[in-house]
Amino acid sequence: MGEEPLSIGALTDLIQPFVGRAGGLISALRSIQSRIGHLPPDTEAAAATAFNLTRAEVKGVISFYSDFTRAPKGRIVIRLCAAEACQAQGGRALQSEIEKRLALKPGKTSASGDLTLEHVYCLGLCSAGPAAMVGGQLMAKASPEKISAAFDACQRARK
Amino acid sequence: MTAPRTYFVPLDSVAVALGADETADAIAASGAKVIRTGSRGMHWLEPLIEVEIDGARHGFGPVDPGDVATLTTAAGAPNFAAHPKYVGAIEALPYFRRQKRLIFARCGVVDPKSVDDIRAHGGAQGLQKALTMTAANICGEIAESGLRGRGGAGFPAGIKWKTVEGAKADQKYVVCNADEGDSGTFADRMIMEGDPFLLIEGMTIAGIAVGATQGYIYLRSEYPVAAEILNAAIGAAYEAGLLGPDVLGSGKRFDLEVFVGAGAYICGEETSLLNSLEGKRGEVRAKPPLPALEGLFGKPTLVHNVLSFCAAPAIIAEGAKAYHAIGVGRSTGTMPFQLSGDIKYSGLFEAPFGLTLRDLVEDIGGGTRSGRRVRAVQIGGPLGAYLPPSLFDTIIDYEGLAAIGAGVGHGGLVIFNDGVDLLEQARYAFEFCAEESCGKCTPCRVGAVRGVEVMDRIRDGDYHAKNLEVLADLCELMVDGSLCAMGGMTPIPVQSAVRHFPEDFAFPPKGRKIAGSEQAP
């Protein structure tokens, strides 16, 4: 993920391959976000022009889906499953323990910008919960210790 | 020197999340051959490694990289069964032998990206037969099989197929709902990761039957492994002539692509899914018009869950009569049940309809992993009922569960031990609905928020009796007034919890912690 802001032209280049395809706007937004980690403000204008939509329509799509974010996230994202199957395996206790250890509420990014903590509803690992995702890696039978070790490994990998 | 031994290591997300990639790397580093497969569904043993010895696949699990050195030594020795991680010949294990695997027959056996491997294991036989049949005959077979939609509603598949087939349009679509968002369900993910060709074959049969040349798989973004494998399998299917302008030399066209969603539970609702696939907000559409007549881009569209499409190849290959003979009453065929929560033998168990809840929870699932008492089972996902052990003799089929106010849903069972607080679970049902409601209709959008508030007042004893009445009233309104199942079925977990576990809704609470109750693992 590059850190430098993308020009509207560069955004348009990322959007263009998806014009005219089913669900093209969503795929285009996904493409931008996977490239730079969030959807910068110019995304709305660039996508509106490319798909012949109003900016409000594009904004409406961005705000509807929980994957899309207009603000940059932390360099490492920790996602914890909050759904029933994980609740039945100690998920609630894990959530409060992680929130306490990180001193961070779900949906928030640490002041250092190192990490974002998120809730998700189901990662499909229900049979071996509680489930988590640390820096894009799936984790089953998650524990504070395993999450902490995975986070440290992600940080080392970045340096 | 003998050829290096072959090890089968799952690439399934659960196995990977438990370290299967590291184990696979360690085995490969020892000089052995590694083939990555789907999972057999025995998730308490993952990573479950298989080795072919004397013509049978023998399992070892759970295997972490530290076990690899002794494993590779043991696998070459006559007394391999003495290895501490040895579990037996996989297909002779009781958990496996008691199943009837129609959908999951190849999952965990084959290399999911290899067309050759799939065809060596009976792949594409349904499609080949379908290409010799008329469209009306294919739809007729699906109808006669008695197959009902596996996504949750249980609508007869044959009626949908015939409706789309009979619709006149310049373009029709086949859309697979792979937005498997229900907690406690993972069968779609497992089959897409372990045998994607089955889904490709089922959708191609459907396309040929209803006259659609384009198919889409709407996949949730939480399943990146499935996305990668599906795309690889679709590429291989094009190369092998299973997809494209001339399916298996028949002159018939069927194109297929994967569309990845963007994180919205509601997109598992078919009309919301279609809006999302059009690149819009995933808001629910009013029905009618039915998607079968006016679906994707306003064209006739056959929308099914992954498992519904995956049932089609066997129905066509073996005939509707053979399929209809499996199961009970109006619930024909098999259902891949998914066991999770506090359960000893967690995973996937495919069986004909007709088992009881007790069979699955106590016998097959082995009771709780923690050793605590089972207090409740939620069947059918976040919109499914919480049931107490006194109802465990209920037979699991569409009618049997409907009679006790529950549903099969997508076949997921989440087991809760006696640490569960059903008031917290009922509150969570509203919280989840508030979070995931698309916002189109008021009963769902506002009702869910009011539901959380009412539940807090009941918990805190604030006008307790009156708020229980308000809750009943709110649930009735959501059931009657919501546009789709999200708002319309959220009252099911809530009301089943109140009905079967009234002690958790009493005030003052009896032996219940007032706040922060928690399930111990």
Image: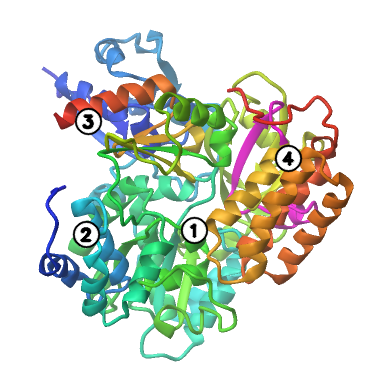
Query: Mark 4 falls on what kind of element?
Result: helix
Q: Is residue B324 left or right of residue B200?
A: right
- Residue appearing at x 23%, y 53% in the figure: A34
Name the residue carrying label 3: B34
Residue B394 seen in this snapshot: no
Name the residue carrying label 2: A32
Share a chain, discs 3 and 2? Answer: no
- Pointer 4 indicates a residue of which chain? B
Q: Quadrant of the N terminus of chain B?
A: top left
Q: Is residue B208 left or right of residue B243?
A: right
Q: Nearer the viewer, mark 3 or mark 2?
A: 2
Q: Residue furthest front?
A: A111
Query: Mark 2 falls on what kind of element?
Result: helix
Label for residue B293?
A: none
Q: Amino acid at mark 3?
A: Val
Q: Nearer the viewer, mark 1 or mark 4?
A: 4
Name the residue carrying label 4: B423
Q: Amino acid at mark 2?
A: Ile
Query: Mark 3 falls on what kind of element?
Result: strand
Q: Is residue B473 above or below residue B249?
A: above
Q: Picture quarter containing residue B330?
A: bottom right
Name the residue carrying label 1: B311
The question of residue B398 being in magenta is answered with yes
